[in-house]
Image (cartoon, coloured by chain):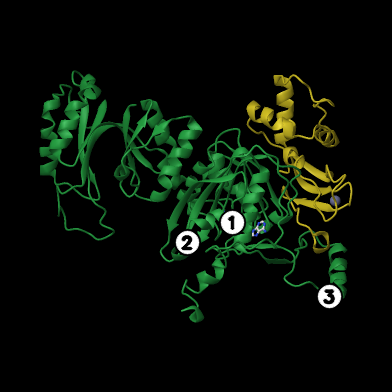
Chain colours: A yellow, B green
Amino acid sequence: MVRLITHNLLACHAKDCNTNNFPLAFKDAQLEIREAEFNPEFLKGFLPKIEWTALVDTARQLGDTSLPLEQPEMLDDEFLKNLHHVLLEIHVEEGSMTCPNCGHVYPISNGIPNMLLAEHEIG
Amino acid sequence: MPQFLFHFAQAHNDFRLPELESIAELLGISLSWPSEFEYRDTARPFMILGLDQEEHARLLARRCILIKAVYEFYAQGSTYEELHGSNRRNQTLWKRYVENTSFRFLVTSSQHKIPQMRQREVIESFAYMGFLGKIDMKNPEIILTCFEEYDDRHGTTRAKHEGDGQFREVFFGRLLEEGSARQLIAKFDVKKRAYFGNTSMEAEISLLMANQTQASPGKLIYDPFIGTGSMSYPTSHFGAFVIGSDIDGRQMRGKQKTPGVIRAANQYGTAARIIDLATFDITRNPWRCGELFDSIVTDPPYGVRAGAKRLGRKKELPDYKKDLCLQHTLNGRPDDQPYIPPTKPYELSHLAADLVLLARYLLKPNGRLVFFLPTVTDEYEEVDIHTMLCEGMEVIANSLQDFGSWGRRLVTIKKTTQGKYSPPTFEPTREETARIPAHRDFREKYFQGFKPKADET
Ligand SMILES: C[S@@+](CC[C@H](N)C(=O)[O-])C[C@H]1O[C@@H](n2cnc3c(N)ncnc32)[C@H](O)[C@@H]1O
Ligand SMILES: [Zn+2]
């Protein structure tokens, strides 16, 4: 935790921050790799929800280059295994996530991101 | 359709049929209910259900928390004469065991103890079945059980054997399987858990909630008020992936480095299925898009133990104070003292309606929202739940857990629409509905002991 599947679903939600507010950029990320159970049906079902470019870029920033820049049409086993690893097995335990638009910093401690907004950031 | 005799736990009766329906649907089992009302009465421990095959009864017994045992149904009657008549007519069902099957015969009852002498008499009255196999008390190939159903005594004790033989009805069948899911109640016992708190939900109810979500491998389930994670353990045990969030990170973390929810999940071997935990106010949530989850399961804060809060202030601050706050927020803070923003109360009836709107946005089509709604029993009317519904969200189950002067309802709502909806605005100002729901101001009523206010009497 924070896993990249979750990171791919979180956008900055500060007041009036509505464009260019995704993906949040990891900073000082401390990674841990933990095995998760492989479920190809889950991955296939989830694929339409993923922002592909954001996922690939983020994975590369964290040092994983196993995913192709273009989402493949054929979902073969090797691709699904790589996708599984990227989405579910890379955990960001410490560090922070910064909004590319407004610069809000969401800190991560012990694997839990603090997505709370400050008083001046809520509508 | 073959008939099966189900023996249910005498607990949470109102949850029984919704659980059966949810699990039957999950496993693709078609169920046929008894046609007469008196046999659908959940105050009774037995029910005869039609299923396509024996295997289906076994599968239900392995997953439904409220099933004690399932039997192949042979006979029933309000007297032994009727029972034997019905058993003779159903001979084709048990004929195959006559020739050469070891067996054991049990005569038992709910709510009552049958004297040994009469148990023997009853067994002898089945002599006409002519079973030739040997009687085996330890490892029989089949167990035949005859059940006498006595009326519930509501806690009053009857002298030993008093009223013996005055049963309401008697049932007879062959044991297929004891309900093994009931053992999970002990497995998930809160007191034996590595991490829990004063908001933790009791194991049996958490399991029933997990079954209402139809948790299974490959599903993604969300708890937006996850607290100490009580429902995440049974849902992940049943194979689902779980995401949780809470406005108060301390609830999920506890005092050690590894978050408490993860420590508890480790104990159950499901930590890898807890996908993530995050700290945020659900009314200010960072979800990038909707249609993410198969189910949402939650126990919203209803103000008795943990009141509902949301970011903001009860009263606006004057400008100079706002400025001070902003400076304070923007200046660096030591890591161990995260900024804790101010919060204001969140009225339960608003929260419930918001939760349904949020669920419509975040659930996939056919997804389920499973949550508790506290309610002041005397004032409750069916309309309460309907005041918080919106287009495309339908109540499919509503089970009361009765605590006497108050109760709470486990509500299951299904997203029946394929339509696309925008995220809810969580605006506190909404049109007041004609009837004020009974869960409005629940916290105040709870602390007044649910007595009408002096000026109202
Ligand atoms: C009844 S407790 C849930 C308990 C949980 N089922 C457990 O096992 O501990 C309600 C939770 O909602 C959280 N909460 C209250 N208001 C909230 C809000 N606006 N957004 C998110 N969480 C909130 C509280 O911090 C509390 O942990
Ligand atoms: Zn932003």
- Taking the spot 59% from the left edge, 56% from the top edge, the residue there is B300
Q: Is residue B193 above or below residue B52?
A: below
Q: Which residue is mark 1?
A: B300
Q: Is residue B295 above or below residue B95?
A: below
Q: Quadrant of residue B175?
A: top left
User: What is the number of the mark on residue B244?
Assistant: none
Q: Whole-percent x and y of residue A48?
A: 73, 31
User: What is the number of the mark on residue B318?
Assistant: 3
Q: Quadrant of the N terminus of chain A?
A: top right
Q: Amino acid at mark 1?
A: Pro
Q: Amino acid at mark 3?
A: Pro
**Residue depth check, mark 2 versus mark 1: number of the one nearer the observer:** 2
* Of B49 and A75, the residue lying toward us: B49
Same-chain check, marks 3 and 1: yes
Looking at mark 3, is its residue's CB closer than 8 Å to ligand 1? no
- B207 sits left or right of B265 in the view: left
Q: Chain of mark 3?
A: B
Q: Whole-percent x and y of residue A123?
A: 80, 60
Mark 1 surroundings within 10 Å by alpha-carbon count, few (fewer than 14), some (14 through 19), many (20 or more): many
Same-chain check, marks 2 and 1: yes
- Taking the spot 79% from the left edge, 46% from the top edge, the residue there is A11
Q: Which residue is mark 2?
A: B380
Distance between the alpha carbons at the discs numbered 2 and 1 = 18 Å
Q: Chain of mark 1?
A: B
Q: Quadrant of residue B242?
A: top right
* Secondary-structure class at tag 1: loop
